[in-house]
Image: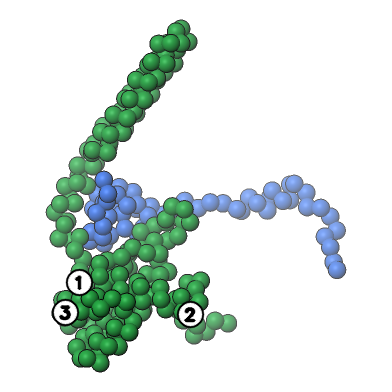
Chain colours: A blue, B green
Amino acid sequence: MPHPKRKISKSRRDKRRTHYKASAPSLTSCSNCGEMKLSHRACPNCGYYAGRSMFVPES
Amino acid sequence: MRHGVKGRKLGRTSSHRKATLEALATSLFKHKKIKTTLAKAKTAKTFIEPLITKAKNDSVHARRLIASQINERKVVQELFNVIVPKIGDRPGGYLRVVKLGQRFGDAAQMAILELVDFNDVASKKKESAPKAKAKAEPKQKAEAKPKAAAKVKEEDVQDANVIEETAEVKTDENIEEKKEDSAEKENK
């Protein structure tokens, strides 16, 4: 069976990993209460989505 | 290739999946709105909407067909006597799925599945809207308070270096203050 001829150096390994990045969540401001919320999801603060109340928050 | 492969298995055997979907249908007709995972909500939608379409034709046969897939007799009556009349002439699309975000614990995508004609929270809009406004204002106060509390803590720490006994008493007071603060926040 074939095997790697050389150990991958720390430099090569780390250079490969420069492309592993976390992406920022796509936030928008809620059209009802103005809080920041994830897009395409009901607002966790006021419970509204698309101008419609989906649930009443507990507090 | 996965051409033409429809539906989700939901990690269940066939009988378990059937039981889950029937339970979801029963709950939905009972409560008009249920919170579940996104995958289950989407699958239940394809299971429940044909049931409602069948229920539009009110006959003994239709009632028996639906009763075979709904776990409670009263819920079948509710479907035929309350839900179908309110749905009226809507040509399909009886259900709505709205995403909620991730659940704590397993980070599952959650969603609300509801009957489009039974969005009862809409009638509570007037009650909930003032609350939302009221929330926005106290937040500024809430932000200000922790800073003040932090200052108090720093002072106490300085005192603690001088006299240990009084510091203990003061930390007790601090705890009480925190409790009061949290109680006030809850009230808001």
Q: Could you tell me how far apart the alpha carbons at marks 2 and 1 are, in whole angstroms?
A: 31 Å
| Relative side of B144 to B80, left or right | right
Which residue: 81% across, 53% down? A7
Pointer 1 and pointer 3 on the same chain: yes
Which residue: 43% across, 11% down? B165
The quarter of the displayed image where residue B86 is located: bottom left
Location of the C terminus of chain A (image quadrant): top left
> Secondary structure under badge 1?
helix
Q: Badge 2: few (under 14), some or many (20 or more) residues near its Cα, within 10 Å?
A: few
The residue indicated by pointer 2 is: B14
The residue indicated by pointer 3 is: B81
The quarter of the displayed image where residue B34 is located: bottom left
Q: Could you tell me how far apart the alpha carbons at marks 1 and 3 are, in whole angstroms?
A: 14 Å
Chain ID for label 3?
B
Is A24 in front, or is A46?
A46
The amino acid beneath tag 3 is Asn
Precedes in sequence: disc 3 or disc 2: 2
Chain ID for label 2?
B
Q: Badge 1: few (under 14), some or many (20 or more) residues near its Cα, within 10 Å?
A: some
Measured as percent of width and height from the top left, residue B131 is found at 19, 46
Q: Could you tell me how far apart the alpha carbons at marks 3 and 2 are, in whole angstroms?
A: 31 Å
> Secondary structure under badge 2?
helix
Q: Residue B117 carries which label?
A: 1
